[in-house]
Amino acid sequence: HARVTIPQIQAWAHSGRRLVMTTAYDAPTARIADAAGVDMLLVGDSVGNVCLGFENTLPVSMAMMNHHLEAVARTRPTALLLADMPYLSFHLSVEDTLRNAGGFLQRGAAGVKLEGGAKRLPMIHALIDAEIPVMGHLGLTPQSLNAMGGYKVQGRVKADAIRMLEDAQRLQEAGCFSLVLEGIPADLAARITETLAIPTIGIGAGPHCSGQVLVFHDVLGLSPDPGPKFVRRYAQGFEDLRAALAAWAEDVRAGGFPDARESYTLPEAVRPAVAQ
Ligand code: KIV
Ligand code: NA
């Protein structure tokens, strides 16, 4: 299979094909998602809460992101591989931002995603000038947790909705190839999507986006708790895997695992040598 490219993603969106993105954090999650035929794999900074036990995404570092991106990239996915700029990796200086994002491309990402609107335009311009494709991210941006005062739906106040529409246009003008819209009313996401030429990828943003993204562990029910309203679970991963592992533990304790099928035999000629 030919690898999915950014022009391919944009052509699919223009033809009306809805885009599918999920997260991948390591080789098994990347292989499963790629085998399922998703269009884009995002090594999200959600790795912090989903895999590393942090309460939010703020402690996630470039070193952590690079470690997980490298594992995903080694599987050589067909899907477009994107990497998420963690908190403070694109806030300090243009030079620092370019080094961090360029490092993602050198590790196999085809582009980067970063949170924020007009405030981030200088960094976004510098990245695109350096041939680094950028996916924007507006709305409920989890790195803004403290400023938002919690994970709350964004764009419900008139001024905020108008600012988001303007931010979306400015990110498109800056050259972003796509935008994630997270945690916003469906009708606002619809308006942004119809206003823009670039595809929008929604998460908790209703059905009128150009595509959808959900965290891998949320789609598969691997998290012990059900997650936010916008998640739909397509498997009971936690319960199914727990039950399977408990069944194996029971077999071990009962002496039922392993049996002949999982065991090696000594060659006939060697048997007398080890016999009592
Ligand atoms: O980190 C992440 O998983 C994300 C997606 C949910 C868009 O940013
Ligand atoms: Na993220």
Image (cartoon, rainbow, N blue to C red):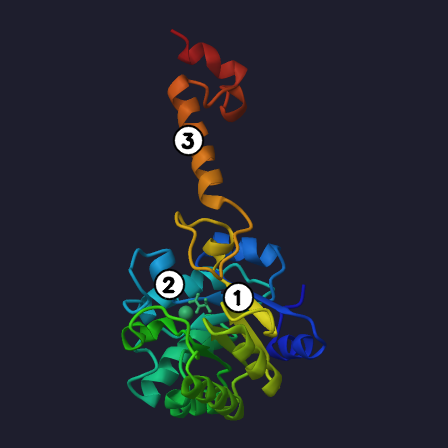
- How crowded is the residue under tag 3: few (<14 C-alpha within 10 Å), some, or many (20+)? few
Q: Which residue is mark 1?
A: 213
Asked which quadrant contains residue 198, the reply is bottom right
**Position in image of residue 157 (x %, y %):** 41, 82
Q: Nearer the viewer, mark 3 or mark 1?
A: 1
Q: Nearer the viewer, mark 2 or mark 1?
A: 1
Secondary structure beneath disc 1? Answer: strand
Horizontal placement of 212 versus 62: left or right?
right
Secondary structure beneath disc 2? Answer: helix
CB atoms of marks 2 and 3 within 8 Å: no
Please report whichever mark, 2 or 1, sits nearer to the chain's N-terminal start.
2
Cα gap from disc 2 to disc 1, whole angstroms: 22 Å
Secondary structure beneath disc 3? Answer: helix
Can you see residue 123? no
| Residue type highlighted by circle 1 | Val
Q: Is mark 1 within 8 Å of ligand 1?
A: yes
Q: Is residue 96 above or below residue 224?
A: below
Asked which quadrant contains residue 8, the reply is bottom right
CB atoms of marks 2 and 1 within 8 Å: no
Please report whichever mark, 3 or 1, sits nearer to the chain's N-terminal start.
1
Q: What is the quadrant of the C terminus in the image?
A: top left
- How crowded is the residue under tag 2: few (<14 C-alpha within 10 Å), some, or many (20+)? few
Q: Which residue is mark 3?
A: 246
| Residue type highlighted by circle 3 | Ala
Q: Nearer the viewer, mark 2 or mark 3?
A: 3
Residue sitting at 60 percent across and 62 percent down? 38
Q: Which residue is mark 2?
A: 67
**Position in image of residue 260 (x %, y %):** 52, 19
Q: Is residue 66 above or below residue 31?
A: below
**Position in image of residue 247 (x %, y %):** 45, 28
Q: What is the quadrant of the N terminus in the image?
A: bottom right
| Residue type highlighted by circle 2 | His
